Amino acid sequence: MEQQELENELLYHMQNSFPLTQKPFETLAHTLGISEEKVLSMVQKLKDDKIIRQTSAIFDTKRLGYKSSLVAFKVDEADIEEAAAIINAHPGVSHNYLRNHDYNIWFTMAVTPESKLGLEKTIEILKTRTKAKDAIILPTLKMFKISVKMDTTGKRAKKEKLKKLAHKELMLTARHVVVIKALQQDIEVISEPFKKATQKLNLSYEAFFDLAKELKESGVMRRFATILNHRKAGFGANAMSVWAVPQAEGERIGKEMAEFSAVSHCYLRPSYPNWPYNLFAMVHAKTQEECDTLIEEMAQQSGLTEYGKLYSTREFKKQRLVYFDDTFEAWEEDALIQSA
């Protein structure tokens, strides 16, 4: 297997099923039929080249008690830089993009279960501070898919069957919380990347991974995986396709669109008089032409005629949300002082 093909296979496995084991890179090495040293060397190079963005746990924000929403601001061009910086400063903003639309700044916002301001008030404060002309709040009404996996091997079928999520109830304990704090950190590229966490928490590997398993089986942890820098990995185009779907057809069409492998996120969201689109499907491809072709195929299959394609022209912020972090409270205290 050539080096490039080997790297692509490695990236595919790390995105899909990163092993939660004492020596995960050794497990990956066995899968690929190469040495652990070779895997460690390749992963470090992929990180140095900014192709691998992060390898850590992905948690369900809602299951952890956080309130969140996609938000769109309409900001004058002259105010975009300052507005983006103001939005990025909030610890609950994990993604923030400039998109080719009148509503030009799109970001995801979350607030903690203990938030004194709440989601809507926080967005209102940001709207004022950024001098946004208008804002749309688009919380998730129904989630069909959330799975960012780039097809680095070219072997993935165009469509995939959606997995039915069967979650067990879980009462979070203090032990779960400390493990969540550890698992949300980007791992080191070393033979035993979880060793420091187990030592710090005074847990055996068995106890640590048992708690991680409980979080995963309950759905609190969606998965543990590697996230790539899409553009560096060769996927130069991503479009947020937005669709005006009749309410009675929303669930059926949403499930159909989510089956496309190139769709990483698919949600039903509210619509408004100034925003008629209620179904969102994020599409990733190597070129804009590929993206356009796929969206046209989705339109033909669904029979929908009212839709839009919002391409990201700039990435202001993209990082995992840090849960149980004191910076949320600090931001709110500062906001309350300024409004007093």
Image (spheres, rainbow, N blue to C red):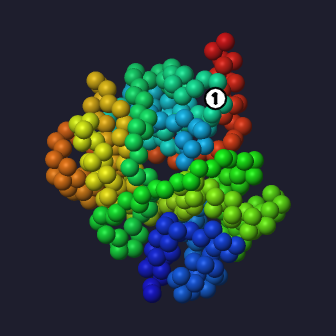
The residue lying toward the viewer, choosing from 62 and 111, is 62
Q: Is residue 239 visible?
A: no
Q: Residue at x 60, y 23 (%)?
A: 117
Query: Who's the residue at 55% across and 62% down the image?
Result: 225
Number of labelled discs? 1
From the viewer's side, name the closer residue of 265 and 47: 265
Q: Give x and y (percent) for residue 101.
A: 32, 35
Q: Which image quarter holds the N terminus?
A: bottom left
Q: Position of residue 153 (x, y in %)?
A: 39, 73
- Considering every residue shown, the one lying at the far front of the view is 169
Identify the residue shown where x is 61% and y is 78%: 27
Q: Secondary structure at mark 1?
A: loop
User: Does the image show residue 272?
Assistant: yes
Asked if residue 84 is positioned above or below residue 41 in the image, the reply reads: above
Which residue in the rendered view is the most extreme toward the top?
340
Look at 55% across and 59% down and name the residue there: 223
Residue 178 percent location from the top left of the image: 74, 51
Based on the displayed image, in which of its 4 quarters is residue 248 positioned? Answer: top left
Task: Tell me if residue 332 comes above or below residue 187 in the rendering.
Answer: above
Which residue type carries mark 1?
A: Ser
Quadrant (top left/top right/bottom left/bottom right) for the C terminus = top right
User: Percent position (x, y) of residue 312?
Assistant: 38, 45
Query: In this rendering, would 181 be left or right of 228?
Result: right
Determine which residue is flagged by label 1: 115
In this picture, residue 68 sits left or right of residue 76: right
Mark 1, residues whose alpha carbon is within 10 Å: few (<14), some, or many (≥20)? some
